[in-house]
Image (spheres, grey):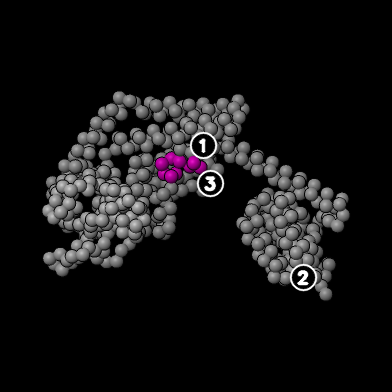
Amino acid sequence: MPKRAALYIRVSSDEQARHGLSLGEQRADLLSYAKEHGYIVMGIYADEGVTARKALSRRKELQRLLADVEQGLVDIIIIKCLDRWFRNIADFYKVKEKLDAHGVDWECTREQYNTTTPNGILMLNLKLSIAQNESDQTSERIKYVFEGKKARKECLSGHLPLGLVSVNHHAVRDEKTAPIVEYMFQHILNGGSARSLIRLVYEKFGHSIKMAGVRKLLRNRAYIGELYGIPDFVPALISHDVFLRVQDIFSRNAKSTPTGRIYLFTGLLRCPQCGARLTGNRGRRLCGDGQWHFQYACPARVNRSIPGCHFARGMYEDKIESYLLENLQSLIQEHIVKLEECRLQQSKDRPEARLESLKAKLSRLEDVYLDGMMDKDKYAKAYKEINLEISELSILIDRTLTIPHALQAVADDNDFRNTYENLTRENKQRFWKSIIESITFDDTPDTRGKGAYIPYRVSFL
């Protein structure tokens, strides 16, 4: 009875295709071999763009082949040469164990191996060892080339995020698309929703983007200059301050709620005992117009998830809102004064000069490494330490010098109360999340009871 043959093909790069290892060339060779030996071809399994050193679980076609082996559908596997199958001794024997358990043989069309003798097994192991060593050396060469590119701040590929483009292997600002990125971050910062950006970006710029693309873009650290985990690698389109505030808005946004259940301060209020974010519920009593009171409670207390938290009060939303509307502009003015004081102190400390000094130090370190005067491990450690200091200093400069536009606009609005009251409930929620980082308060006997005054503490973005 003719043997049932499975043809396994693998090609990892265009270079291999140029050397006669293309998928088409391998397929023709294997089909011809199967025909000459009278095998019945049960299937062709082709891993394209996959290296032989890649984990077995990530070689999908190989996994499909092994599944058919376990189902008893294959008698023999045909490959062109051994390195099309494996360049790793351990992986070879893992698969061989499965093949032996199901009585499946394997053959190469261009190489011959006799695994029934000690010499044959020795030759097989030598071939695999040589292939593994070649793969390791290639990997090391690629890593070396990539390290050099990173040191010179060259892009490792031509694919860059929206707003950036590669010119002479270096990322530069793309004047056509960078305004799209800046608009999207500013939209979120001003209280807009991520979902509305799909329509707005298309109407304003004619650029189509999906919801998954919006969230991925707004979380991409390349826009603050960080690429491949290296700060100041590409031109920053967004300041650290704006980027971090947008991430904070994302982290505090709760899942969508049914109509009529939009809680204005979701994610902003903190439990005075355990620090957890208070969650919204409709309360236990009705307002005068028949609507339920919106209030907030500590989830740790309700779910008994944090032993020791005894804060069981419900905080009414209308009282929190009333306090903020009465005190918001004065609180913002105080915040701006503190920012100005920090700016004055910062100008004395001259962090910009320190930042330039660190960048120069980093450049000198790269030159020393490229000249071969420093080993890789020592370079990597020093490079990481300097980059961390640069990143922290950049964030400090951004946060201290920037007075958020949204806060300044509220402080300067002479008719703020009327402006706020004309917002929809959804936009009121966006407004609070666009300017406030957290709201805290103390739970003391003086703040309890009907009519008690609670002085909330507001931290602004």
- The image quadrant where one finds the N terminus is bottom right
Name the residue: 18% across, 65% down. Answer: 285
Q: Which residues fall within the magenta stretch?
A: 221-229
State yes or no: residue 129 in magenta: no
Q: Nearer the viewer, residue 130 or 459?
A: 459
- Find disc 3 in the rendering and name its residue: 158
Q: Are marks 3 and 2 in contact (CB under 8 Å)?
A: no
Occupied quadrant, residue 315: bottom left
Frontmost of labels 3 and 1 is: 1
Q: Amino acid at mark 3?
A: Gly
Q: Does residue 426 appear to the left or right of 45 in the view shown?
A: left
Work out how far the residue at label 1 is from the one at label 2, CA to CA, in angstroms: 53 Å
Alpha-carbon neighbours of circle 2 within 10 Å: few (<14), some, or many (≥20)? some
Q: Position of residue 329 (x, y in %)?
A: 17, 44
Q: Position of residue 139 (x, y in %)?
A: 65, 43
Residue 189 appearing in the image:
no
Q: Nearer the viewer, residue 271 or 42?
A: 271
Q: Amino acid at mark 1?
A: Lys
- Find disc 1 in the rendering and name its residue: 153
Name the residue: 66% across, 59% down. Answer: 47
Name the residue: 29% across, 48% down. Answer: 273
- Find disc 2 in the rendering and name its residue: 4
Q: Position of residue 162 (x, y in %)?
A: 44, 49
Q: Amino acid at mark 2?
A: Arg
